[in-house]
Amino acid sequence: MRQNHYITIISNRKQIVLGTDKILYVLVNGRNTEIHVLGDKVYETRVSILELAGQLAEGFIRIHRGCLVAVRVIHDITDRVYLNNGEALEFTERRKKEIIQQFHRLQKDMIRSFSDGKTPASREAYNSCYRSFDHMPFAFTDIEMIFDEKKHAVDWIFCYGNEALARIEKMPLDELIGSSLGSLFSNMDVKWLNGYERATLYGETLELTDYSPEIDTYLKVICFPTFPGHCGCILFDIHEIEYIKSSDEAEKALQLYGFTYLGKH
């Protein structure tokens, strides 16, 4: 899909340059146009949605007269257009079939573009790329997402992992690398997929904290985009994370970070 890498707008009397890969959707609000971007930021501008549609090109779908949505952030289209971040947008009902067809076509093009020759082609190439992670004290893996016919992430393949990953997954690297999670664990928990899909398609860096029944461990996972169609994951066993209050500002920092401190001192 071809589209501008950046657009320039005037918002709040300031010139703003926005990367199109950071834009979630564009929404007309009265006389202004709102540009919603990653990080829950919204820029208001007087630039018309028609002009923005021309600048954003094929990476976006017009779901009604006053709304453009980035294809990469759409999770599903049913009664509404559901985004990977949990938001839901109304669309023109009579155009539902057309919108879904356009979405599937553009998403298929986007996923096909993952095979761009930049991704390592072998296990040796991944090992060479990530050699600096081999002896890190934290678990790290690069995973390739697997999509179904509806272009939803349904599994992933371990393409690289370090020894710390083998320890946290309780499985030798030779068994992990090149295998899908579903083939390794019959009790695969799909709740991680949404975050990994968002990192892969959406370009987000996310932190996930939850229980992993596959390895009977509570995990903290930081995931982020790497190669096209892939994301990297740093994994921690949360029972091994020690909290140290280094100053009076530490508690404020934790609140800003969004953690609820559970009594570790």
Image (tube, rainbow, N blue to C red):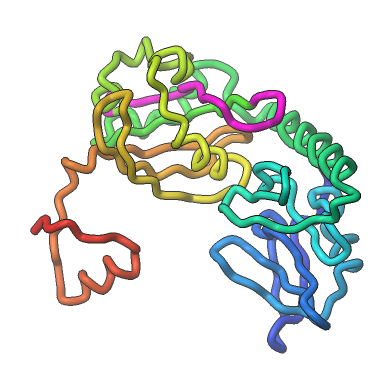
Name the residue nearer the viewer: 138 or 187: 187
Name which residue lies at 57% across and 53% down: 86
Q: Outermost residue toward the bottom?
A: 13
Q: Position of residue 71 (x, y in %)?
A: 74, 47
Span colored in magenta: 148-164
Q: Is residue 65 left or right of residue 258?
A: right
Q: Note whether 223 is above or below 5 in the view shown.
A: above
Residue 116 picture quarter: top right
Q: Position of residue 225 (x, y in %)?
A: 54, 42
Q: Position of residue 252 (x, y in %)?
A: 26, 74
Residue 107 is inside the magenta segment: no
Q: Is residue 170 left or right of residue 98?
A: left
Q: Note whether 133 is above or below 156 in the view shown.
A: below
Name which residue lies at 67% across and 66% down: 36
In the picture, the quarter occupied by the N terminus is top right
In the picture, the quarter occupied by the C terminus is bottom left
Name which residue lies at 49% across and 24% down: 126
Residue 162 is inside the magenta segment: yes
Name the residue nearer the viewer: 192 or 115: 192
Name which residue lies at 65% across and 43% down: 75
Q: Note whether 89 is above or below 198 in the view shown.
A: below
Number of numbered callouts drawn = 0
